[in-house]
Image: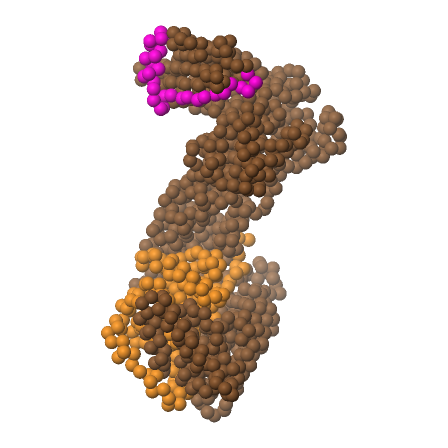
Chain colours: A brown, B orange
Amino acid sequence: MASQARGLQNFISDLRNAKSKDEETQRVDKELANIRKKFSTTGSKVGEDGNNPSLSSYQRKKYVWKLVYIHVLGYDVDFGHAEVLALVRSNKYSEKHVGYTALSLLLRGDDPMINNVVTTIRTDLTKPAPVGKNSSSAMSDAAQSLALCSIANISGLELIQALHVEVQHILVSKTSTPNVKKKAALCLLRLVRTSPNLVAGREFAPHVALLLQDKHLGVLLSSMSLLNGLATQHTDEYESLIPYVVHILGMLVLKKACAREYLYYRTPSPWLQIKLLKFLQLYPNAIVPASENGKTESPTNSKAYIAQLTSVVSKILTETDVSDSINKSNADHAILFEAVNLIVTWGSAGPIQLREGAMKLLGKFISVREPNIRYLGLMTMAKLAQLEGSAEGIKKHQATVLVSLKDADISVRRRALDLLFVMCDTDNAERIVDELVAHLVLADAAIREEMVLKIAILAEKYATDLRWYVDTILKLISISGDHVSDAIWHRVVQIVTNHPQGDLQAYTAATLLVAASPRRCHETAVRVAAYVLGEFGFLIAERPGMSGEEQFKILHQHWDTSDEKTRAILISTYAKLANLYEECRPLVAPVFARCKNSVDVEIQQRATEYASMREAFSPEAVEDLLREMPPFEDKRQSALEQRLREKEGDDSAAVVKAARPSAAQRQRAAQSAAAARAAEEAAAAAEQNGPSDVAQQERASPSGEPTAVVGIPKDVIPAMRKAFSNLCTSPSGVLFENSILQVGVKHEYVGAQGRISVFFGNLSKAPLTRFRTVVDEVDHLRIQKQGTQGLLDESEDGGCTVAVRTQAKLLLLVEVTAPFDDAPAMRVIFDTEDGTRHEYPLRLPIVATCFMEPVTLEPGAFMQRWKSLEGQDRECQEVVKAPPNAPPIDEEYMKRIARIITEGLKFGRCQGCDPTPWTVSGAATFRTAAKDLNGNNINVGCLVRVEANPQAGAFRVTTRTLHPLCSKAVKNVALVSIKLA
Amino acid sequence: LCSVSLVSFLQMIKGIIIVNNHGKPRLVKFYQSVTSEEKQQSVIRRVFQVVSQRPDSFCNYCEGSIEEWGENIKLIYRHYATLYFVFAVDANESDLGILDLIQVFVEALDKCFENVCELDLIFHSDRVHYILDEIVMGGMVLETNIVQILQAIKDQGKMHSDSLTKLDPSASSNIQQRLGGDTAKWQYNW
């Protein structure tokens, strides 16, 4: 074969010697100018399409190749097409060859030049072989080949429309040589892909059948490629060809009948085997005998090939082994993996021993060291995992897969991640998700987004307790917040909003408040926290350290570092806080005032609207505006699944898995649907009967089904918070009250023990049924419960009935075992007469200060202990403003503060330490029932000081104890009490 | 039924890129066209970035997205001395099959150039394209049998010289002479 022209060689050498990109560009520009000059016609003689006919064949080829070379280097080439066409039109093979090759490199499918070349291509395609002269017959063959090749490479719509008939004709023509046939088959395939309806299946299938009987393996291979392409688009129309395909497979695999030259490292044409197996994957039912299939009219109904197919696949499965030659091993495994894919498509219809064999092999592959085999093993096992009944077999390999998750190669890690995702179910979800989260810390950036997305999907799918889901997402945010997309945290909001059952909403609010407490936390955490606290913050506002004001402070510390999007969310949350808590209003107002001038339109608008809302609307309208969001519509496909689908395509095993709802999800969906239905019915009933006729709403929802749950109405929240705070420091009082229910509490304590009575009074005009309370177990309290019969039932259907104007009673005997700073949760659940379920999450006022015993200390002893307890862990300090409507701080006021410390917090006053009226100091012992090594009860000494600043109208509370939790608890109770003083 | 969805069975080679250890492309063939020269170069850079960071002990597959081709692109590559042979395929190609194909391609080059080296690819890009055209056509595998491939190339060569009417004596000048010692097989770096 002739070598290239010297001018081109020199040009390439010059470019290689270029010392810089600039020098290269200069050389290219010079050459382009030169070629342009050579190509431009001089005077009268102009060739077809404007080429320069005076160029010699050699020159034309040389310059065209230079252009191609320049194009490949990345430079724009926008001329010279005429010369390329001149070459294509030439009768000399050398010119034609260069012309066609240049054509497919320089031209794209949509190039307008195509029109000019169509005629030439058609001539080359259809040129009949001249009889007799051998050389020109070869020439016409070669021209056909070149034409087919460039049609396939360029594949423009124009070309297809103009030439597809000719291409089909060549393919089925008896006179076409094998070389031409195989190119025609692929060319047609390329055309069919661009225009799927070019070929009518029913008529064309017999032609393909003829091609499949060709003796030439090269023709077979191309025909199979074509057939796979056609059958993918119109599967039914090519089903009749299954027996031919199985026959060829049988020849290759069982009889090893194959032309010697098509053996690739002793394996009969692996490529062809792969294509055949891929074709069969299109027909999952092919393995089912016709009688069972119910398709009696099928042309393949005898299904005589089933036995042959089974033995082919079984032979591939059993006889493949790791070979010394890497190439031989590659080829054999390529076939093997395709056979396994075929077994997977058969599913449970296929022979069981093949499925088991495949599983065993894959188990071996995922533990070998050879990275390619391991990679493909993991990938194929993920496919196999979709088969029903395969789960148990695959779970055995969990430990092996986890090893690959830590592989150095990211491709292997990706596959391991994918397989773990697919094999995850309710049983192993926690383990797998925890492993993935642990690994996320170490994972590199390239895989993090994918991991975060998959963990989020799994946690949602398999959470039996949604609190675990919330925790998991929070971990994702703290480990890899940048990869937690909006879709993920929006999903948290949706799920929490849609699940009012249990204490999920309160739990999420509390957890997020804690997460947002540190000065530095990820902005995504701030966003979720802001949204969730705006919605459900009121559920935790009575907890120590979580009042509305504190919620505001914790959120607002992030204001300066937040972007506009976060600020917009914060503003809405502030509006909700300000609406609920009077003490937040003076904090929020200046923020709104500043934001009225924000450059961000969204923020400006929100701030202005919220700030003027109270003047513009009635209080009811404001309530309405700031009410919690209604439940979200439950879409069939979550945004996360959508993202996964975009990334991995429709047939990824992971996508199929994600789309299939888990048992936990189905259960949750059923609950939400029932709740929504009940809510709708209740609303419809209310509409029918008119709002005044409450008593007539007797359309109870069907019993046994979960119903709409009514939570604590927002308007009673402020009163409820106050009641709780009061109760922390007083022995009896009302904890909760609305128009239906009143909850009263009486509590007394001796040392580490307490006795708490809770009364539930029915204030409505009808009995309350299925009345139950659930008191959460906590680590730091031993609780014994007694109550009205049924009150403490654990089952959903249990409970007692509380008649009109009567009470149910609950008695709790508690013993404290460790310091704490919380208050135990109690849920009250009951049905009203109209069938509406109410569920109120309350807090019992059993706080640390309940277990204090006053201690009287001499001033010297007090100061000595005070100093010895200095230090970060032991001291808590916070400044609190007197309530806005309180009188100025005077001595009278200070007496009230002192009473809070002594009677409320049960501290002994240490008068000697308070020389002025502006301080109050006290000491106490926190008693627990826990024993130390010597058998003595463990007690914690606690000191407190309140210092007033009458000018600023503020108090500073400092607590020092041996235990950080005690310091915090005492400080919190002192703060809320002072606010109420 | 728990069958796997088989909707997109495209099986297409999107492009073939041979690039040396320094990121210089030695052969570039796009079967799924990319709109401009600039984009082509960015694809090449991206491909090189990905494969060059992987030690030879890793598997021969990289998944990921190449903006110009879409999200589900797999790079299947082999590293021979100074050159990376990279085939970009969609997710449905037989992975090991493509590895075999690369091997066939390299064996064919080796036979045609008698111990192929990087320089052959630089100075004979036309022949490299001719060989590739006999193996892959329009992004589809045309022939995997090395004997057939070599025969086709030989036939072409014969016709090529037949069609040349005894001209261009300069065309067959000896590169080796001009390049002197710069021909170390597979060792050459740009």
* Left or right: residue A664 compared with residue A449: right
| Number of disc labels | 0
Q: Depth check: give the residue in front, A440 or A598.
A: A598
Q: Is residue A865 visible?
A: yes
Could you tell whether A798 is left or right of A551 in the image? right
Left or right of residue A408, residue A582 in this image: right
The residue at the point 49 percent across, 9 percent down is: A891
Residue A229 horizontal/vertical position (percent): 52, 67
Looking at this rendering, what residue extends furthest in the left direction? B181
Q: Which residues are magenta?
A: A857-886
**Residue A782 on image: x %, y %:** 45, 19
| Figure check: A191 above or below A487 | below
Using the image, determine if residue A727 lies above or below residue A451.
Answer: above
Closer to us: B20 or B146:
B20
Say which of A41 and A544 sits in front.
A41
A590 part of magenta stretch = no
Instruction: Give the left or right position of residue A413, taking residue A776 as reference.
Output: left
Task: Check the image and report above or below for B71 versus A73.
Answer: above
Picture quadrant of residue A965: top left
Judged from this view, the residue extending furthest toward the bottom is: A132
Position of residue A341 measured from the top left corner of the image (x, y, whole percent) = 46, 58
